[in-house]
Structure formats: structure tokens, C-alpha cells
Amino acid sequence: MSVLRQAPLVPAIILGGLTLVAIFADLIAPHDPTLPVQGVGMFAPPFWMEGGSAVTPLGTDFQGRDILSRLIYGARVSLIVGLMGTLVAGAIGTAMGIVSGYVGGWVDQIIMRVTDAWLALPALVFAIFLAAMFGPSMWNIIVILGAVYWTRYARVIRGEVLTLREREFVKLAEIAGASKLRVIKKHILPNVMNTATVLASLTVGVVIIAEASLSFLGVGVPPPQPAWGLMLSEARPTLMAGQWWLTVFPGACILLIVLATQLFGDWLRVRLDPQTRNL
Amino acid sequence: MSAVLEVSDLQTHFFTFGGTRVVKAVDHVSFSLAEGETLGLVGESGSGKTTTCLSIVGLLPRAGRIVGGRVLFEGEDLTRKSQRELRRIRGRRIAVILQDPMASLNPLFTIFRQVAEPAFFHQQLRGRTLRDRVQHLLRAVRIPSPEWRMREYPHQMSGGMRQRIVGAIALAGGPRLVIADEPTTNLDVTIQAQYLDLLKDIQRESGVALIFVTHNLGIVAKMCDRVAVMYAGTIVEQAAVRELFNAPRHPYTRALLGAVPKLGSKDPLASIAGQPPNLASLPAGCSFHPRCPEVLPRCASETPREIQDDHGGSARCWLVSDGIARS
Amino acid sequence: MASPVLEVHGLTKHFAVRAGLFGNHATVKAVDGVDFAILPGETLGLIGESGCGKTTTSRLILLQETPTAGTIAFDGRDIGRFDGAELMAYRRAVQVVFQDPFSSLSPRMRVHDIVAEPLEIHTRLDAPAIRRRVAEVLELVGLSPDVGALFPHEFSGGQRQRIAIARALVTETRLIVLDEPVSALDVSVRAQIMNQLEHLQRTLGVSYLFIGHDLATVAHISHRIAVMYLGRIVEMAESEALCARPLHPYTRALFAAALPSHPDDPPAERTIVGEVPSALAMPSGCRFHPRCPLAMPVCSDVEPAVTVRDGGGEVACHLY
């Protein structure tokens, strides 16, 4: 139990580090990620292997571009799309959940049926379809991911709002004559933020993987902007040919960021739950 | 009459935050109870009355531990017993009735099954004898038509009836001591009156000793022979019920008695300033001193000792020890 | 004789419920023809056990439910005919304090904002004026204005009730419905709050509808008491008169069931038997007759009319 009370060192370091890397990519990355590196050939292995060079420490890809630089710039895409996509999904989902739960009646029914229909569609396929339809660009992807993943928020938030609605302080506001809008703004929203935040931190990983999947399938953020999923996709032909560094490094990055967000989300959940917090 | 229960210098502490925070929930509590006697354990939230009872029967939550003192039940020290031994005693020789009957009753089992359980396990009754015993118990708690009531489930009964069934379960093992922790708090006033009358009748017939935990002095006046008033984990005053109401010695007892509205009187209520203390950060000296209307300078630094008197009562207050006790 | 702040005539609320799995529609007559009036500066106590209708009555007054029949009149005017603005004025003048201090304050709002909310809803005061009023009312309930910056969880139960009372007073309220306001508090704190409420009534002239289940508490603070049973008022009288001579057998049973204040108080006669019947199976005639020790044949046929009680007030029983 005491372990959970400590600051989540490991995930915080990972996430913090990746954020810094993404922000300062221009300063950190040794090479331009979109251009082949002069003097080093294609498929150069990492520097500790034979044929590798310290100029491109983690090797080069099929175009001779530096893997390390591409990983660094790729962090940007994963973080931005991951976080922004989660934000959009969270905003839409929370809003729907609140309206559905608080207003009730046929509004609730309609929103819930829409949610059901949405959930019936396989998320990724739907995302691919939308991406293909609207064309890939960073912002399109963000909005698409938000539009695909909001339903998980809506359901949970609605449940929470249903309970909140019956709490006395909400009833008191209603008795005092507060408008529905006021009650939502001042009483309902602040009290669902905890749940929404925890939910967000737990689903950031899903969105990141979704982005990676889209990139992998070629409908994500368009080249030449590097993205980890795209790197995996480009490396597919070489998977069995022995150039392991083309897949392992991007894969490890994806693993790392998702793991970090999951651990962080878990810590946050325990931290924000008033019952376990006051032990 | 020998003492059924003798609690000596009981200390129970709660260890939280990995042992860094210690809360002295029960701090040097001593009292005794004879056969057929009813002791009222009076206090507000945080006084330690429930923790005392849980300590007696060994049902403390994981964070709690008895760190000192003895609990002699019919001569045996319960603090030295293993959980297995305590399980044999609980339900058979000591019974506990809690505040919320729905929490004590299993919604999935029939009334018969739940009332029969103690007799089944502890007294090995079976078949016809068991059924008769259950009906006898249900009749003893005045449940009408027990033969078909016992086939019903808890949710089919009213709150008052459920609490009486909990009472029947408590009595099923033939206990010598019953600990009732605020059993009437959730009951309607008239139902409460019926229930308390029932408890009194049962006690008179069976001679069982009863600890009645409550914050309600009216219940104490109606039910109890002796009273122990608890505050912040200690007993601040102990006396026979009449003496407590006629001549309370501790300022807290006096304040409590003054704070209760009397039917038909519009006299202003004596209120006590402040609120019950947080056990994690108790004041120095006497824990009541910040709220005490009769506080002396030494109360802020020295914790008063328990002074016994010659009729089994006691008080923990410098006013009493210094011989300036007023009646 | 001042005119009543609130007057209730024939107030009735029936709920249609579905009894059983396959829905035999039944009616729960939660409140069935209730009449009372509350004068300015007065406390009317409403006492009864579960199922008596006191909670539903308060919900009707607070506009959480609409009556099936009957009227609620505020300053002599039927609120059923109020338009939007008049209803807002009603809400401004009639507030409530609930039983549970731990769930009646919004956990993520500061105390200042909690108390200021009715002002923000009903008035156009600017921020400094609101701050002044909030400070004023916090002092009235015995709290320092500095507590405005804190959150509810930093306060004890008694202090939270004070905050709830402050909020109920902030808009120059005329009537506060107090729904078991001290039942969830420790004994030592109850007296503080009760005294505070009485002091506030003397100072501000606000009226109270005090709902409770403990006779001694209700009798202490109320000028008049109404005893409810299964949706009707069975007896209503001045507090002292009722305590001196309770007439209705149910009122007498409540008094008998009340706990003594001293061990030497004579034990009460055990007058009442059984439990409150389900509201779905209302007894015929006088609703209390199955449990009444003085029931007569007429009691099971005819519902007793309300008559004037000697000693003032009214009672509904065939004995009188």
C-alpha cells in the first residue's frame, strides 16, 4: 500500500522524459529525420554492431535515415496525437455523458442508443474508414480518434452523473432555483472531473496504439513526418531479413509510452479515490 | 454475583500509513459486568465505545491491535486467545448485535437458516429439535406466526422485525454476554420502545449480561444499571445509573445531561463548545479540557488519573481528584 | 394576528406504483388531505414515523413534487398559479436544510461559493456585495467569515450544518424547512445547533418547519406541533398543550414510547402494538384503528373528522 502512496516515479520519469524529448526534438535529434544521412548507407545497424557507426547510433532505415532522429521526432506525433485525441474524446464523451445523465428522458435515450450504435462498430476499422474518407493529416487524425473513442467516456460519466444527481447538494441547488446549466457547470462537472481524468489517463494508451495502428496501415499521419507506427510499417518487409533494429526500437518506444501512461493512470486512480487516499 | 466480564486497563491502537500514525482508540479502559447486569457505554463519535466492544470479541479491523490490558470473560483472558478459540466463543457465549440489521442478515438465506446457524454449529442441534428451537427463539423475540415467518427472507420483513431476528440469532447460542451496539438507531420511535422492552424482558428471564453501546442518554435511563461515559478513548466517569443522573461528577457528563432536551420543557439547552476531538491529534493533558466549562490550569498539561470511589464508580477528572467535586 | 407565511389546504399527493412483478397498479397515498399554516417567526414541528408523509410534505413545499390535489399558499397566494418570476421569488424565500451534513455541501466548491450560490441565482448583486452578505450570514451562524476559502471536508458535522443554515438564510429567507437537521449530529453538537436556530429565529423572524422523529427535540424548538400518521395530521396543537395533554391515541403512544430523561421516571404504559402498515394496504376508516388500544366499532368504518381540541388546536379521532 505504501508503494502506491509514493509519487509514481517510473511512469513520471518516462512520460516526463518523452515530453522533453518531443519538445526539444529539434535540439536533440542528431540528424534530419526525413533525409538520408550523408556517408552512412542504408540499413546500417546500431553502433555496437559490426558495420554500425556512432553517427547513427541506432542504425538507419531503408532510405538511410537515422533511426534515432526518427524516434525522437516520432515521439511528437505519439504524444500530441495521443494526448489531443484523448482530450477530444474526453470532451465529447464527458459532455454527452453529463447531458445524458442529468437531463434524462428521451435525450438520454437518444444519446445512449447512439452510443450503443457507435460501440457496435469496431473502433479501428471505423477510424480507418474515416481516415480514408477525410484524408490523413495530424489534425484530422486527432479529431477522428476523438470521434471514435468518446463512447467509453459517455457511458462511465453518465453512470456517475446518475448517482450525483441524487446527491443532496445537487438537490439543494435545484431547490434554490438553479438552472440546469448552472447545476451542471457548478456541481456536476467538477465532481466528474476526477473520474474523467482517471479515465483519460487510462485510455491515452489506447489512443496512442490506435494512432500507431493507423500509421502502420498507412492512413495515419502522412509521411515524411515520422511516426512510430509508420516506422513499424516501413520495417515490415525486413522483419525476417535480420534488420531487427528497424522494428525493435519503434516497438519498444510504443511499449514504453503505453506502459508509462497505464501505470500513471493506475496511480492516479488510487490517488484520487477518496477512500483509499485517506487511509 | 461473579463478574461475567472484567476489562482491565484495555488499550487498543490503530496503526495506519505503514505504522507511522498511531491512533489510541481505546486508552486504559477498565470496567466489569456482573450476571444479569446492563452496562451502558455512552459516548459520541470517536469516543472509542465501538472499538472497545470490537476489542472484547476480537473483531478489530486489520489496522487495529490490542496493545495492553486484559479482557477476562468468565475467568478466561480473551486477549490471549487465538482467532480459532474466539470463533468458538463468539456466537455461543458472547453475542453481538449491530446497528444495521440489513448488514447483519444475509439477504440470500431464509430466516430459519440464519437463526438456526448458532444452534447448529455450537450446540449441534439437528432436525426436529433445531426447528423447535428456532420457533422458540422467534417467539421469544415476539415474532408472530414463527412457523411460516421462518421460511421468509430478510427483505420481506420490516426494520423492527429484522432487528428482533438479529436478536434471536444473538440469543440462539445461549450467550452469557450480549453486546448491543446502537441497535435502535435506525428504528422508529414506537418500534424502538417495543424492542427495548423486549430486550429488558429477555434479560430478566435469562440473566444474560448486556453491554449497551449508545449515545442516547434516554436509552441509558431506561435500560441500564450502570453507566460508563467515554470520551476520546477513555472512560471519564463510571457510576450506577441513578448516581450518574443525580450527581454527575465529570464536567462532560454534566454537559451531556444538560444538552438533552427534556420533554415538555423549553429551558435553553446547555451546549458544549467545539466538537469531539480527532483521535489522531488529541490535546495534551485531559482530552476534554479545550471544551470544559470548568477547566483548571493543570488540566492542560497533566492527564488526570482514574479515581475509584467506594461503590464501584470512578471519575477521571482533576476536579474530583482534588476533592472539589460538586454534585 | 399576522397572516401566515405558508398555508396548506387539503394537500394531497398520491403516487401510482406497480405492486408485484406483473403490475397491479396501486396508489400510495403518501399525503392525503393535510392542512396547516405557519405564521411569521413561528416554528411548526412535524412529527411522525416512517411512512407518515412528512418527507413528502416537505418535498411538496419545496416544489420537488407537484400536488395531486390541494393548494399551497405563500403570503396568501396559491403557488400553483405562480408564473416563472413568482416561483423564483418563492424559491428565494423558502429554503431547506437536510439531515446529512456530509452530502449536502458540494465537495468541490469553497464554502464562500456554496453560501453565495442562492445570491448568484436570485440577485444581481456584484461580487463585493455578495462577499459582504456571505460574511454577514456566516457570522450569524457562529462561523468566522474566513472559513469562506475552505472546502467542506475540512469541517465537522456540526460546522457543516451551520454552513448549510447560512446558505439557507442568505437570501433573506422567510421559511426554512428543517428536515431532521440535528439527527445526524453528536449529542453535544446538537444543542449548539438547536440553540443557534432558536437564536436566529428570534433575531431574524424567520419561520421554521421542523421535521423530526424525536419528540423531545421537536417539542423543544416548536411553537406548535403537528402529528402525522399515514398521510394525515391526527393532532395539532401548541407545544405545551400537546405535551400536557396529548389526546389522540397515536400521540399518546408516541409520548409513551419517548425515552425517559431520568432512570426514576415512571415506566410508560405499553400502549402500542404492531407496526406501521404498508401504505399500499391502508386500513379502512381511521387509519390508526388496527393498532389503537381504544378502537371502537365506528373507527373501522368512518374516517374521523377534524375537530377542535379543548386546550386549542385540533384532533382527528372518534373519541372526541
Image: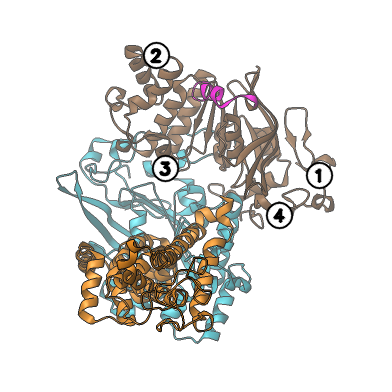
Chain colours: A orange, B brown, C cyan
Q: Please tell me which residue lies in front, C43 or A105.
A: A105
Q: Is residue B150 visible?
A: yes
Q: Secondary structure at mark 2?
A: loop
Residue B42 pos. (x, y %) = 61, 40
Q: Secondary structure at mark 3?
A: loop
Q: Please tell me which residue lies in front, A81 or C133.
A: A81
Please tell me whether mark 3 or mark 2 is closer to you in this view.
2
Residue A94 pos. (x, y %) = 35, 70
Q: Is residue A178 visible?
A: no
Give left or right: position of B149 versus A74: left
- The mark nearer the N terminus, 4 or 1, is 4
Q: What is the CA distance from the residue labelled 3 to the residue labelled 2?
A: 35 Å
Picture layout, residue A220 above or below residue C201: below
Q: What is the CA distance from the residue labelled 4 to the residue labelled 1?
A: 15 Å
Question: What residue span does the magenta drawing correspond to?
Answer: B80-93
Q: Which residue is mark 4?
A: B291
User: Going 50% across and 70% down the picture, which residue do you hit?
Assistant: C109
Q: Quadrant of the C terminus of chain B?
A: top right
Q: Secondary structure at mark 4?
A: helix
Amino acid at dot 4: Arg
The answer to whether the residues at label 3 and label 2 have Cβ atoms under 8 Å apart is no
Amino acid at dot 2: Leu
Amino acid at dot 1: Trp
Q: Which mark is residue B188?
A: 3
Q: Which residue is mark 1?
A: B318
- The mark nearer the N terminus, 4 or 3, is 3
